Image (cartoon, grey):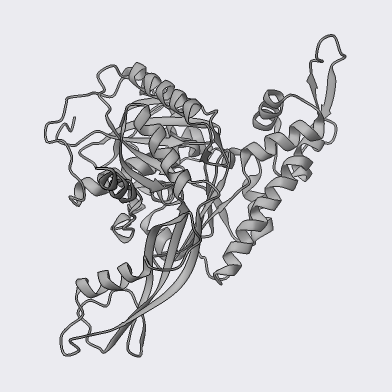
């Protein structure tokens, strides 16, 4: 057991569920899950905290469930995911003329170039969350990944700027702090999910990560090792459930159950003569619902989400020919039957489901290897990256905490096989290279916004 490493906790505040996962890397660099708790989320809509009290209650419940899974855990600090349809992105261009043209380009000049982008005009009430350089130019040289050491008169770059609503970000932070936790960092959910389900080859081949949650669908597009685009699509699993509820005249809980148990994203694949019987309300006769109709409703909404994905890919000029890695579907909504086929049909790109299990140590319960927890696992990976690169202060003394029996899988050594329906061999998992330097590219400053606010009040 590797007790030299810190225990890092990810907190995913979603529209339908709130999850807390505590993990520690073992000697093979894989995550051992030491605690896991979840709860229903009531105060969040479309990824935005609207009711702070309800959200605090749900975070506390998830935390209590996490402690119940492992009473030896001690959790004070968490990495928190941030999404919501207030998250937007834009492309900008920046250049500086150098003072000392006879010397080599230094990191200080690149930092200056990036800092200048924080002055970009954005609508009132929004805040720049992250400025990500795409590729640099030095004089007439184009597409330079890293210009340090070059010589030249003018240095420039294309930038991807991510913005979010100040109050929405504050509400997330306030909920976490009032639930008795300290936010170690706020991390963009599309980036967290990407780090959990993507390998080094995907990053280089070019890939679109589509994380279908309850309230929003997060999109992150990578090409030639660079984050090219991020978007938050305001439709997801909850919309499908509401469509079923309205279209078939059933209760929301029944709609959710039908979607999970009998739902399909392709109506052609649904049996024409199959029916689901739903008990009638208060003495009303039982309802017969066609599985085909159910699939039609799901397909209509899922196609719309995939049309948005295609639209965003076209916007950045990365439609079908460019992304050799295709589309990686993750998040709870990715578990719908026949979604891979529908995605390939609508986008014209190869698709697969992204599981966070290649970062997990073997022998965990199946639940943890589900795409639903990609964001949470990604948040822990972000914490480890900070720890390994000395970006933040971590405790020096680490408690000896073992993986609790309740989170061990006693029946199968390979949760991956059970989940995917196709065996993912140990050799294949080892072959997929972990992402190197992924988080180093994002100097997001979300958490610094609160430090600045606090300083003003002191």
Q: Residue at x 17, y 86 (%)?
A: 100
**Vertical relation: 39 (above or below) 212:** above
In percent of the image, x 68 and y 47: which residue is there?
A: 302
Left or right of 343 in this view: 99: left
How far across and how far down the image is residue 210, in percent? 54, 51
Residue 38: image quadrant is top left
* Left or right relative to 259: residue 356: left
Q: Where residue 122 appears, x then y in whole percent?
A: 48, 63
Q: Nearer the viewer, residue 264 or 171?
A: 171
The picture places residue 380, in percent across and down from the top left corner, at 32, 40
Residue at (78%, 45%) from the top-left corner?
Answer: 268
Quadrant of the frame with the C terminus: top left
- Residue reaching furthest to the front: 457
For image coordinates 23% across by 83% down, the residue present is: 150
Q: Nearer the viewer, residue 429 or 342?
A: 342
Q: Is residue 425 visible?
A: no
Above or below for 19 versus 428: above
Question: How many badges with numbers are in the image?
Answer: 0
The N terminus: image quadrant:
top left
Q: Which residue is outermost to the left?
A: 397
Q: Is residue 445 left or right of residue 300?
A: left
Is 164 left or right of 448, judged from the image as shown? right
Q: Residue furthest right?
A: 285
Is residue 388 in view? yes
Q: Position of residue 231 (x, y in %)?
A: 53, 56
User: Front-most of 127 and 437?
Assistant: 127
């Amino acid at each position: 057991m590797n007790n030299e490493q810190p225990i890092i906790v990810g907190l995913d505040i979603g529209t339908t569920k709130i999850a807390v996962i505590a993990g520690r890397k073992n000697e093979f660099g894989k995550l051992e899950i030491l605690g896991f708790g979840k709860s229903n989320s009531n105060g969040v809509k479309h990824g935005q905290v609207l009711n702070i009290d309800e959200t605090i209650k749900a975070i506390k419940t998830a935390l209590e469930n996490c402690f119940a899974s492992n009473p030896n855990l001690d959790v004070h600090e968490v990495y928190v995911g941030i999404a919501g349809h207030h998250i937007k992105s834009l492309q900008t261009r920046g250049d500086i003329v150098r003072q000392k043209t006879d010397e080599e380009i230094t990191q200080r000049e690149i930092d200056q170039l990036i800092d200048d982008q924080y002055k970009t005009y954005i609508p009132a009430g929004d805040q720049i969350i992250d400025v990500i350089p795409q590729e640099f130019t030095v004089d007439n040289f184009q597409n330079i990944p890293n210009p340090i050491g070059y010589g030249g008169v003018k240095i420039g770059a294309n930038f991807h700027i991510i913005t979010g609503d100040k109050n929405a970000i504050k509400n997330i932070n306030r909920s976490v702090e009032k639930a008795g936790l300290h936010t170690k960092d706020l991390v963009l959910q599309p980036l967290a999910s990407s780090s959990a389900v993507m390998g080094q080859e995907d990053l280089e081949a070019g890939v679109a990560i589509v994380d279908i949650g309850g309230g929003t669908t997060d999109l992150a597009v990578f090409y030639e090792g660079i984050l090219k685009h991020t978007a938050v699509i305001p439709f997801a699993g909850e919309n499908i459930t509401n469509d079923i509820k309205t279209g078939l005249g059933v209760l929301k809980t029944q709609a959710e159950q039908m979607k999970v148990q009998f739902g399909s994203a392709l109506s052609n694949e649904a049996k024409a003569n199959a029916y689901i019987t739903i008990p009638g309300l208060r003495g009303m006769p039982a309802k017969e619902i066609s599985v085909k109709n159910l699939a039609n409703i799901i397909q209509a909404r899922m196609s719309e989400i995939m049309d948005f994905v295609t639209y965003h890919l076209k916007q950045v000029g990365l439609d079908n020919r460019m992304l050799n890695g295709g589309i990686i579907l993750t998040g709870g909504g990715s578990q719908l039957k026949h979604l891979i086929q529908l995605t390939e049909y609508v986008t014209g790109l190869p698709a697969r489901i992204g599981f966070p299990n290649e970062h997990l140590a073997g022998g965990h319960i199946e639940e943890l290897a589900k795409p639903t927890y990609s964001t949470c696992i990604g948040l822990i990976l972000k914490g480890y990256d900070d720890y390994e690169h000395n970006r933040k202060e971590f405790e020096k003394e680490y408690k000896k905490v073992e993986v609790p029996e309740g989170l061990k899988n006693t029946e199968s050594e390979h949760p991956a096989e059970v989940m995917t329906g196709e065996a993912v061999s140990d050799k294949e998992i080892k072959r997929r290279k972990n992402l190197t330097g992924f988080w180093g590219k994002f100097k997001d400053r979300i958490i610094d916004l609160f430090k600045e606010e606090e300083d003003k009040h002191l």
